[in-house]
Image: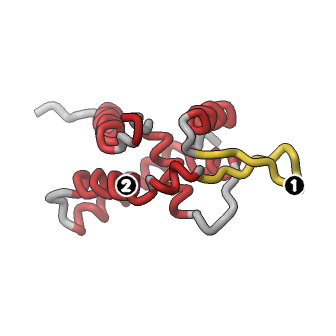
């Protein structure tokens, strides 16, 4: 039996997850969220009692400023988030949910939870722990290569 490539297996999983996110996160006006937008929303939900800045999202997602800026602009156009200037530093923007996003919070959380449950279906807790350990090691290996 031919050994499958870790690289291509991970890429295939990434594509399948992206499709699921797009399918499960259709919100009002039938507007699906991209995987990056879903991760941003999830981050904002997990940190809703804290101030979140664009640079926090850049660091969390490991994406360039220009990439995050473009995604946030799309989310602003779709009335999901607002970027507001910080009084102490005009160069810094705080990212907050709009009323529209707040009203959809439960729906968004439920969609993300469904995807998570689907991913973990029929996987034992032990196997899931091993998988997560391996994924963390792969991420570490890749980040060491970029130093």
Vertical placement of residue 20 versus 43, above or below:
above
- Residue wearing tag 1: 87
Q: Earlier in the sequence, mark 2 or mark 1?
A: 1
| Colour scheme in use | secondary structure
Query: Which image quadrant for residue 128?
Result: bottom left
Q: Position of residue 109 (x, y in %)?
A: 39, 57
> Can residue 6 be seen in the rendering of this structure?
no
> Can residue 130 be seen in the rendering of this structure?
yes
Left/right placement of residue 146 relative to residue 114 reads right
Query: Which image quadrant for residue 7?
Result: top left
Q: Position of residue 3 (x, y in %)?
A: 20, 35
Q: Secondary structure at mark 1?
A: loop
The N terminus is located in which quarter? Answer: top left
Q: Secondary structure at mark 2?
A: helix
The C terminus is located in which quarter? Answer: top right
Q: Position of residue 47 (x, y in %)?
A: 58, 63
- Residue wearing tag 2: 107
- Tell me if mark 2 has few (under 14), some (14-19) or many (20+) residues whose alpha carbon lies within 10 angstroms of its own: some
Q: Nearer the viewer, residue 65 or 11?
A: 65
């Amino acid at each position: 039996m031919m050994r499958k490539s870790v690289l291509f297996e991970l890429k295939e999983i990434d594509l399948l997850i992206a499709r699921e996110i797009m399918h499960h996160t259709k919100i009002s006006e039938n507007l699906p969220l991209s995987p990056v937008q879903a991760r941003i929303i999830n981050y904002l939900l997990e940190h809703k009692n804290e101030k979140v800045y664009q640079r926090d999202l850049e660091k969390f997602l490991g994406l360039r400023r220009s990439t995050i800026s473009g995604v946030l602009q799309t989310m602003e156009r779709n009335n999901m988030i607002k970027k507001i200037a910080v009084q102490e530093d005009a160069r810094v923007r705080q990212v907050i949910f709009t009323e529209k996003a707040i009203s959809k919070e439960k729906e968004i959380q439920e969609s993300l939870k469904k995807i998570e449950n689907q991913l973990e279906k029929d996987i034992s807790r032990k196997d899931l722990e091993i998988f997560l350990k391996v994924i963390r090691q792969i991420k570490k290996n890749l980040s060491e290569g970029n130093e």
